[in-house]
Amino acid sequence: MDKSSNGARMTRSAPTCEVALPRPVYQTFTYILPEEIHRRARPGMRLRVPFGKREAIGCIDTVSEGEPSGRVRSALELLDPEPILSPELLDICRWVARYYVAPLGLVFRAALPPGLLAESADESDGGGLVRKVLRLSQHLPTLEERERVFGRAIRQREAFEALEELGGASTLVELEGQGFSRSVLGGLVKRGVADLSEERVERDPFRGLEPSAEPRHQPTPEQAHVIEHLTGMLGESAPGSALLRGVTGSGKTLVYVRLIERALESGRGAILLVPEISLTPQTVQRFRAAFGDAVAVLHSGLSAGERLDAWQSLRDGRKRIAIGARSAVFAPIHDLGVIILDEEHEGSYKQSETPRYHARAVAAVRCQREAALCLLGSATPSLESWSNAQSGRYTLLELPKRVTDHPLPHVQLVDIRGGESPRSNGGSGTRAPGGPALSGPLREAIEGRLEKGEQCIVLLNRRGFATFVQCENCGKVWSCEHCNVSLTYHRRQQTIICHHCGFRERPPVHCDECETRISYSGIGTEQVEQRLGDAFPAARIARMDLDTTATKWSHFRILERMRQREVDILLGTQMIAKGLDFPEVTLVGVINADVGLNLPDFRASERTFQLLSQVAGRAGRGAEPGEVIVQTSRPGHFALRAAVEHDYMGFAGRELDDRLEPGYPPHRRLANVVVSGRSETRVTDLAGLLADWTRGLIRSRSLDGVDVVGPAPCPIDRLRGRWRWHFLLKSDGPRRLGSVLRYLAVHHGQPSGDLRIEIDRDPESLL
Ligand code: ADP
Ligand code: ZN
């Protein structure tokens, strides 16, 4: 018995509750409920409790009259007059915790707006912080004047241009993150080209925007048929799931809008999930045009206070439609009619940290429990959804043609193997092995578009200037100190950077081992931008990748410039492939389709096919037909051939066959168990031990049908200073796999020291 610390005591038949704390532990914690708390306490309310020597805020899972056993302390304060999690949401959170083998408190935290389950008070941000913002002045030096203004202050000029690229304003923190020092940034203010100010919360551009005056189209007969079918499902007592496979430009958005209208008419609410909200301003705008104030946009770009407002407006029923990325699947909507996942195949629907839930799976389960309809839309459905549609578990609906009746764009593969000899680049020694950045056909095609005043999109799914920094003589490759990956050269910032942990250093001048000169190879978007600029000096080029979209609304600004036709060539990573609808884009160029194809991951072909189909779908959406040019050194690869033919079914058939023998999804269920830590031997030992233990468990508990593969080093076997080994579990069905994972978590979930175990059920990637 403990009498020492705050309120700890043993009591007979005192009411208690189980509290889930937002911590990486699998159990809930028992607390005694003092009389005045007990009277009001219900599951789903937040509770302040003592925890160790500190306090914590958790969420009540269950309340019981039972007798506490052992040392139990008293809860301190009830924080909510009403549960913040409804019984339905509690229920779905418990399902997520159980299925993904994740701590319930972390699931609650993921389901709630940020700050509500903060570990400590200072983590929550009441309504936006004050930020120091650097903003370009009204009168900017022209290109010629820049020489004079900046003179030899090269870094200041670079900072100036970085700021320009970021849309003219950025926070100091973010610019510093790009490698510019305070004194360099201060120099811009001294020269009078920029001003420093303190700003509270940045404006949400969605809010200020007049909903664009979209004409209210009449559905085509194909759309009308799909809408009718879905409306029928909406009225059923167990609507189930439907997959809408509609080619790019087939008008899926209008189907979503009409379906939500039907739900609202019958008094029910709706959730629309999009892969990444800042990349899909057009989709959001269409919904705002259709539904105005009934829409709440849940957006990570909002401050914590703004998000809380949006969330509360849904919970109160003032708004009935939630739009957001994956976490919006937990939006507090009563009487839910439908959840729609646009681009359902997107990997970003899977959370890459605990709880590692997939919004598609959560949506399906939530809909089932709340008798709502789950609609998945895509031009290139995931193989999981496709096989569910094939087997009849999902209703399959199709929109095989574009609304405009134009054909899908013509796609041409250009073989870049040993094409042109590597071109030297302004004396910097940069070259592009594996082919030129711009092949003859692509260059001519862009030229033709520029002459006609049409827009182009150019994709390369790799940022930076060059992805390999290597000694020409001894072959040494510069790699990260903390990760087993090579460093990428970023020319503007004059650094080499690890894209996994952010480690950065100055690029080498010559090899420190054999003093030979350095070569840079493997082209990235920064270099493509330069090549395009060299080839088409008059063209207005905008680059959109992680480096140019560091600030909150920078995506939005770049896309807005594109829409206003202030940009001729939009260049970028996969960010530019999604849901954009620019009718003047008639050409899409892919610099190198092999980038994703060569990844050591079982979804490499699927991802490549999807990306190519998506980006190709940006071309020819208006009156003029579209053309797509894909550069590759693997022109015979079936995923590329299928993309050329717009042959989804052909691709899916072949890929499903290929996955049969190794037992990859959707044929079998997968879980990836990753062991990591700072000592390589301890990681290897523990991975071996756990894999053996799991095999033994499967035998002794007769959990047949679950196989253990491995252990082996992860494809990236060192990340942020931690060694990583993994083993895979493959299972014929979900149930037994779940049992094995839960045993594993309970018995070995918290290893000692700095060792860690991560369980990733239904992984999107095995890297
Ligand atoms: P998807 O999402 O399937 O790629 P969108 O929903 O973006 O396609 O629609 C493609 C284009 O067709 C948009 O510009 C949209 O405004 C237009 N559109 C959709 N439905 C109709 C219709 N019934 N009549 C005329 N235009 C339509
Ligand atoms: Zn690193």
Image: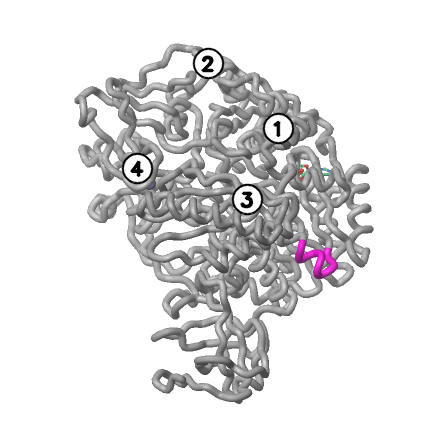
Residue 273: give x, y in percent of width and height.
61, 50
Residue 298 placed where, x, y %?
Answer: 55, 56
User: Eyeballing the image, is 304 above or below 485?
Assistant: below
Q: Residue at x 56, y 80 (%)?
A: 41
For label 3, the residue is 729
Q: Is residue 749 left or right of residue 280?
A: left
Residue bounds of the magenta highlight: 365-372
- Pick the residue in front: 619 or 379: 379
The residue singled out by tag 1 in the image is 658
Amino acid type shown at disc 2? Arg
Q: Is residue 547 magenta?
A: no
Dot 4 and dot 3 residues touching (CB under 8 Å): no
Q: How far separated are the C-alphas under marks 4 and 3? A: 30 Å
> Residue visible at 52% across and 51% down?
356
Residue at (61% x, 50% y) in the render: 703
Say which of 275 and 475 sits in front. 475
As drawn, the label of residue 417 is 2
Sequence-earlier tag: 1 or 2? 2
Residue type at numbered disc 4: Cys
User: Between disc 4 and disc 2, whose residue precedes?
Assistant: 2
Q: Is residue 371 magenta?
A: yes
Q: Of the residues shown, which amino acid type is indicated by label 1?
A: Asp
Tell me where residue 237 appears, x and y as whole percent: 80, 58
Where on the image, by quarter, is ligand 2? top left
Distance between mark 4 and mark 2 Cα atoms: 29 Å
Say whether marks 1 and 3 touch (CB < 8 Å): no
Q: CA distance from mark 3 to mark 2?
A: 39 Å
